[in-house]
Image (cartoon, helix red, strand yellow):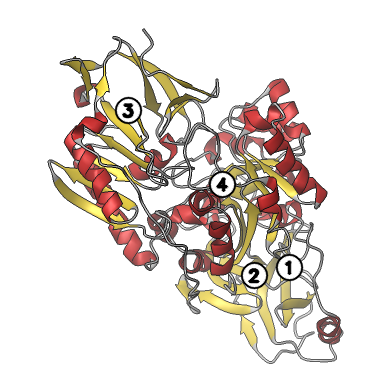
Amino acid sequence: MFKAFQMGEGQMRSLLEVARGEAPADLVITGGRLLNVLSGEVYPAEVAIFAGRIAGVSRTPGEYQGRETIDISDDYIAPGFMDAHVHVESSLLVPAEYANAVLPHGTTAIVSDPHEIANVHGLEGIRYMLDASEGLALRVFVMLSSCVPATDMETSGARLSASDLASLIGEPRVLGVAEMMNYPGVICALPDMVQKAAMGHEHRMRVDGHAPLVRGRSLQAYIAAGISSDHESVSVEEALEKLRSGLQVLIREGSTAKNLDALLPIVNGRTARFCSWATDDKQPAELQNEGHIDHIIRRAVAAGLDPILAIQMATINTARHYGLHDLGAVAPGYHADLVTFSGLHDLRVSRTFAAGKLVAEDGKLLQKQTNQTRPPVNHVLTRDLSESSFLIAATGTKARAIQVIPEQIVTKTTIVEPVVIHGYVVASPEQNLIKIAVVERHAGTGNIGLGLLKGFGLRTGALASSVAHDSHNVVVVGASDGDMLLAVQTVAQMGGGICAVNEGRVLGQLPLPLAGLMSGEPLGVVRDAMAELLGAARSLGCPLDNPYMAMAFLALPVIPELKLTDKGLVDVLAFQIVPLFVD
């Protein structure tokens, strides 16, 4: 359902009194220059706020009187920024801590897909994310996770049908159906996918897309199901074809997938309104050191994009696409979610207002966000493991290996001739070829998918994590079977988490007891633990900026080209499990 202006009669009467100048505003923000995302203009203006909404905007100083006045001293004022697609769980932070991280950077609303926790805890997980984000200054909107599990080629902790998801449609912050990751299922009209898309349309909701490298007639069929957006484009040609076909193109720039530079050429004065910014996944260190949507705006403007277009993509474009008709602009009746900043060409956030309240100033949070919602009980079940659990019998001389592509979540298939000793494949770091395994952890089935990984750079030791999109089994990469075993055991003992080990010793660990995905600790604690883990990975030879994020996507069988699940090696383009050896 598209969200119209939602205001009670009494509130509206009072707001109109303030707008007419017959009653004082709660707050008047004066002395600044309004960046009007509706007209594309910049001009001096003051903004009157009452009961969390904008009562009026005036180009005449002193036209509105307020109980409080804030002079922003020639800063620009604009709507608060919006992230068009994000998985909060991938920040490793609970919603309140995530809000604490992004509010100082001017982000006041996000469109989230909780399919990470949904794949672990099902409806209980989605309800937790709704409850845990209630009452925050950050507006957390939720899309209903459409692919739990993402495919039948993996084992997840839950399975959600269209009727399951329908039970959440009445929730006020639910906007639609989340990314339809099983794009072959949509294209081929599998009943489950059709039912979920139809459910969204029946309730006049958006249905988000996920169509990596999908082109031509397959893309036309996918969009014909009523898909409205996509955040998976990696080239101008792909993004332009999707834009021409009616999709809102969400340009993603996160911790792992960085597509801004490649896609920016599609954005101009004619196309920008059909484009928005999204992070998808971003981790604590980057949130704190780089920023959030403000960082994307700075990068885009530095690359030559008109700053007004860049800010429209962070505000009104996203709000209008998702039917949030009282967000995304500075105009009468809109929610007073605002950001002030200096410098159009080097945007630096100075203040963040949420519902008319100053919540952050000069990079510092003024109102710490808290929420005490209790999470679902988590578990990590792994059957008895031994070093032999990671043995790969050589049934040929040539094998498929997953080829890592730095700063991308897509991978390539490469054919290698692995080193074989006594009939078993061994890691050969000198060839940049190591082992990868995915260990099922939800039901204790004993499933272990085994494969080879090229280009990861690890020369010794092992890394393991229970953050493994989207079913979130335990993914482990390593140059030693013994260290791979210890890494998985360490994750299990923590009840979920991330660790690095070498030669039988744990070098670093981060417990993630909330669904094996989130910490519950403050941002600084999580950031420091991740810094230790990243340092450990570098000491083991891995050159990737964030190898743990890269690992998480190596288990995602809806992102081309070759991935690994607990059920085996997945050729994503053929959408089927394939053998490791090719001869």
**How far is mark 1 from mark 2, CA to CA?**
8 Å
- Amino acid type at circle 1 is Val
N-term mark: 4 or 3? 4
**What residue would you read off at disc 2?**
338
- Amino acid type at circle 4 is Ala
| Res 573 → quadrant | top right
Q: Please tell me whether mark 2 or mark 4 is closer to you in this view.
A: 2
Above or below for 71 versus 188: below
**What residue would you read off at disc 4?**
300
Left or right position of 10 against 307: right
N-term mark: 3 or 1? 1
Q: Is residue 395 visible?
A: yes
Q: Please tell me whether mark 4 or mark 3 is closer to you in this view.
A: 3
N-term mark: 1 or 2? 1
Q: Nearer the viewer, residue 560 or 342?
A: 560
N-term mark: 2 or 4? 4
N-term mark: 2 or 3? 2
**How far is mark 4 from mark 3, CA to CA?**
29 Å
Q: Which mark is residue 330?
A: 1
**What residue would you read off at disc 3?**
455
Q: Quick one: SS at disc 4?
A: helix
Q: Quick one: SS at disc 1?
A: loop
Residue density around tag 4, few if under 14, some if 14–19, many if 20 or more, within 10 Å: some
**How far is mark 4 from mark 1, CA to CA?**
22 Å
